[in-house]
Image: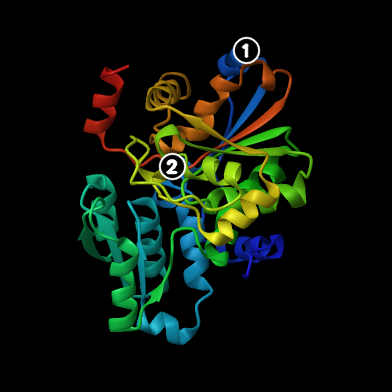
């Protein structure tokens, strides 16, 4: 199995230097006082397309051969990877077909279409997005750009943590949203190289804790389609490449509830004046569950995205 390395992260950083945003690192004095810790938020909700996914999507397309670019690409995603591949394809003049669930947020579908991609919808509960994408690979000769099971995608995602460490130095702990594991895997590569003593935790919705179960059992565990407001973290299983890296380097996997995500979403709006989607809140939501374990420490949190329509945001806030 071809695992990504930190050298791949460095190459990705070079490709992304002129196209991706160097997102800000923010903090909250109020939160630091509440937790008794120093917390640094890497704000990938302010990345192009509103999520870290642009990093991996662009890097994967930029690494394709001229022949592959000419034929085009296909991807499957609930939204952020879809937008990332669509925008990267537009920038690199590559045809893109995106397989998206019918239940994907309207704001993410609209953006993906606006970038020029062709959208193929499917039923998340009854159809396989992988099979649909594979049909396009076989029928049209397109190259599959998976959302996380790809060394170039992982390397691109790792550039977010690289920027974080480059700006603020070493950390005691780092919390990372976890779906399929691409962001966490890339983060682990950067942490190993730049802050090897840092304990890196993946955080997933409790209803979709396949990664937590996988680490506990020492094998990839497949779960039924989970139900959570964290729509970007509803994967049913890790990929072999992400499982290998997470099993090798992660300090552990934590889980949070939807109620904890809503509380965190409100914190970002009220205290930090920034919109973060539920999936993007995963890492931050774990802070409150850690309690005294993080007191006195330097803590990093990757905010993975901020793509959320206003109606859904208002609905969630009225339920807290």
Question: Looking at the rendering, which quadrant does residue 228 occupy?
Answer: top left
Instruction: For mark 2, give the secondary structure.
Output: loop
In the rendered structure, find residue 318 and report the number of the disc placed on it.
none
Image quadrant where one finds the C terminus: top left
Q: Residue furthest right?
A: 197
Residue at 40% across, 24% down: 269
Report helix, strand or loop for mark 1.
helix
Residue 212 screen position, x and y as percent: 54, 40
Q: Is residue 127 above or below residue 310?
A: below
For the point 33% across and 51% down, which residue is it?
79
Q: Earlier in the sequence, mark 2 or mark 1?
A: 1
Q: Which residue is mark 2?
A: 305
Q: Residues within 10 Å of mark 1 (few under 14, many from 20)?
A: few
Point out which mark residue 33 bears. 1
Q: Are marks 2 and 1 in contact (CB under 8 Å)?
A: no
Provide residue 113's location: percent of width, then percent of height.
24, 60
Left/right of residue 98 with respect to residue 35 in the rendered view: left
Can the viewer see residue 14 in this picture? yes
Q: What distance separates the C-alpha of mark 2 from that of mark 1?
A: 25 Å
Q: What residue lies at 40% left-to-right and 56% top-to-bottom? A: 81
Which sits in the foreground, 182 or 155? 182
Residue 117 lies, in percent from the top left, at 28, 66
Going by the image, does 293 lie left or right of 179? right
x and y, in percent, of residue 189 in the image: 68, 53
Query: Can residue 114 be spotted in the picture?
Result: no
Which residue in the rendered view is the most extreme toward the front?
217
Q: As rendered, which of 128 and 273 lies closer to the eye?
A: 128
Q: How is the image coloured?
A: rainbow
The quarter of the displayed image where residue 100 is located: bottom left
The quarter of the picture where the N terminus appears is: bottom right
Q: Mark 2: few, some, or many residues within 10 Å (few <14, many ≥20)? A: many
């Amino acid at each position: 199995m071809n695992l990504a390395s930190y050298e791949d992260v460095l190459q990705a950083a070079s490709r992304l230097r002129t196209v991706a945003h160097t997102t800000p690192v923010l903090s909250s004095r109020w939160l630091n006082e509440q937790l008794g810790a120093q917390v640094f938020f890497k704000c990938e909700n302010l990345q192009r397309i509103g999520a870290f996914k642009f990093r991996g999507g662009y890097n994967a397309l930029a690494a394709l051969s001229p022949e592959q670019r000419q034929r085009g690409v296909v991807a499957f995603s609930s939204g952020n990877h879809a937008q990332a591949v669509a925008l990267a394809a537009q920038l690199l003049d590559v045809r893109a077909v995106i397989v998206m669930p019918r239940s994907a947020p309207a704001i993410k579908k609209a953006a993906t279409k606006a970038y020029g991609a062709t959208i193929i919808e499917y039923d998340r509960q009854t159809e396989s997005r992988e099979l649909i994408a594979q049909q396009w690979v076989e029928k049209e000769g397109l190259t599959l750009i998976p959302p996380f099971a790809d060394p170039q995608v992982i390397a691109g995602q790792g550039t977010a943590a690289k920027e974080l460490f480059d700006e603020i130095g070493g950390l005691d702990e780092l919390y990372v949203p976890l779906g399929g594991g691409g962001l966490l895997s890339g983060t682990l590569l950067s942490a190993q190289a730049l802050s090897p003593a840092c304990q890196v935790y993946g955080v997933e919705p409790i209803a979709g804790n396949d990664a937590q179960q996988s680490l506990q059992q020492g094998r990839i565990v497949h779960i039924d389609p989970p139900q959570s407001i964290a729509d970007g973290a509803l994967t049913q299983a890790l990929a072999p490449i992400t499982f290998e890296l997470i099993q090798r380097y992660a300090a552990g996997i934590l889980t949070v509830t939807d109620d904890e995500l809503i509380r965190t979403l409100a914190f970002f709006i009220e205290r930090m004046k920034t919109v973060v989607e539920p999936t993007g809140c995963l890492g931050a939501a774990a802070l409150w569950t850690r309690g005294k374990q993080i007191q006195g420490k330097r803590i990093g949190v990757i905010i993975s995205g901020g793509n959320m329509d206003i109606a859904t945001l208002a609905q969630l806030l009225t339920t807290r």
